[in-house]
Amino acid sequence: MQPNSAHALLLTVGTGTPDRLEETVIEPFRKSLEKGEWSRVLLFPSKETEGNAFLLKERFPQFPIEVRALRKPKDEENVDACFAHFDTEISRLIEQGWTPDRITADLTRGTKAMSAALLMAAMVHQVARVRYIGATEREKNGMAKPGCEVPTDIEPQKIFLRLKVRLARDYLRAGNYRAVESLFPGAPQVMYSGHLCEEIRWLAWAAQFWGAWDRFDYKKANTLAKRQGMPAQSPASLQDFIPGEAQLRLLDILSDTEPAKAPDNVKFCRALCADILANAQRRLREGQNEEVLVRLYRVWELIGQLRLFVHGIDTSNVDRQNSAVMKWLEQNPEVAREDSSKPLALGRLKAAQLLAFLEAEKGDPNGRRIADRLVNLDKPDEFGPRMRNKSILVHGFKSRTLEADRELKKGVEEIVDFFGSEHPDNLKWLAAAQFRFLLP
């Protein structure tokens, strides 16, 4: 690794005017060499101009000059050959510890093919600066007037920044939130300079917000939704990445106190069902089928929990003194025999069976329909509890959903329909849980 103070200068070498080498080669190079402090200087001549390169090395012994000529005659007119050579040399520099932020590429001299190739290689490796020699005065032929050359540095990062902004949009639409954060380290807290600074801030914010939501980190997402420290208005071009009012209401519920101490346990569970379903749909879109299987099981289980909350029963702490529960326990002595000194907690199937009992007692046809379906989840070839238990992510040793995209999609559609039939507001919650900026 080179010290942080070490900088490298790369320069293409042209023919100059043969009878005026002092004016057209030596002095212009002097100006470029003297602008900066260089620990290494690489000259890139053609076979034809290699002599000029060695002349420069002789005339400027105070600079650590190395000559790296193109391999073959006429390569100077071949952009691909030039690029391959310059790319190799820059790669070698970087391997030796010269980080791109300490490399400057001067592409003024040589053929147009050489200049274009060095610019391409510099951009590929994201070098810090590209230099060209301008002039305060020019001769009639357009060439810089000797003695009037002015080295000017530009920062290709400005070009890369626009590319990164475009890439960040693509990553967001693909649901790759961490990748967006890696493009703009520190943003949105760190302000980037330039005319793209506001786009960068909002793209970084969107990646953090939607990424947190997608990972079920509701509290962080809700905090980010307040947009503290962000401008009041986002750029019009990024409106797709700004959550709507219905989404913010959903997030408020999900980030609040969880059951059984939520302000409204039933509403919380319906909101959570909707969000897990939407998350499953996103995983299905990505082909993460085993993840879908696990989420579908949780939704089936959660629907049973929320239906019992409708009856005022918490599956993690069932009141044994509840008259309806007592009656059910009489019919299920194996459950009643469990240690009465501990809270009675019911798993998915027992909870569904208790729900079926309560709905039958109540005589509600829709409630009985829902409960009966929750009791009987394991149909042949269905992605229910049995399939979930054999998943590689739970108790199994292999994926249960390979080559099952169509069947799994059908399973998701079925549970969406079932969830929608449980309450009139459920599909509204599901709509609010969608990340509509994602590509289909």
Image (tube, rainbow, N blue to C red):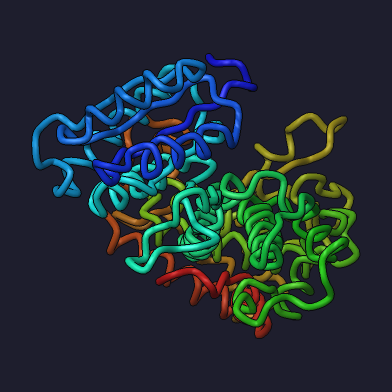
> Where's residue 58, x and y in %?
37, 18
| Residue for point 51% across, 32% down | 33
**Left or right of residue 306, residue 392 in this image:** left
Q: Residue furthest left?
A: 73
Quarter of the view holding residue 136: bottom right
> Where's residue 78, x and y in %?
14, 48
Quarter of the view holding residue 269: bottom right
Q: Is residue 355 visible?
A: no
Pick the quarter of the image with the C terminus. Answer: bottom left
Q: Is residue 38 visible?
A: yes
| Residue for point 30% across, 52% down | 116
| Residue for point 74% across, 71% down | 250
Q: Nearer the viewer, residue 330 or 1?
A: 1
Q: Residue furthest front?
A: 19
**Left or right of residue 368, residue 269 in this image:** right
Q: Nearer the viewer, residue 320 or 406?
A: 406
**Left or right of residue 310, residue 235 in this image:** left
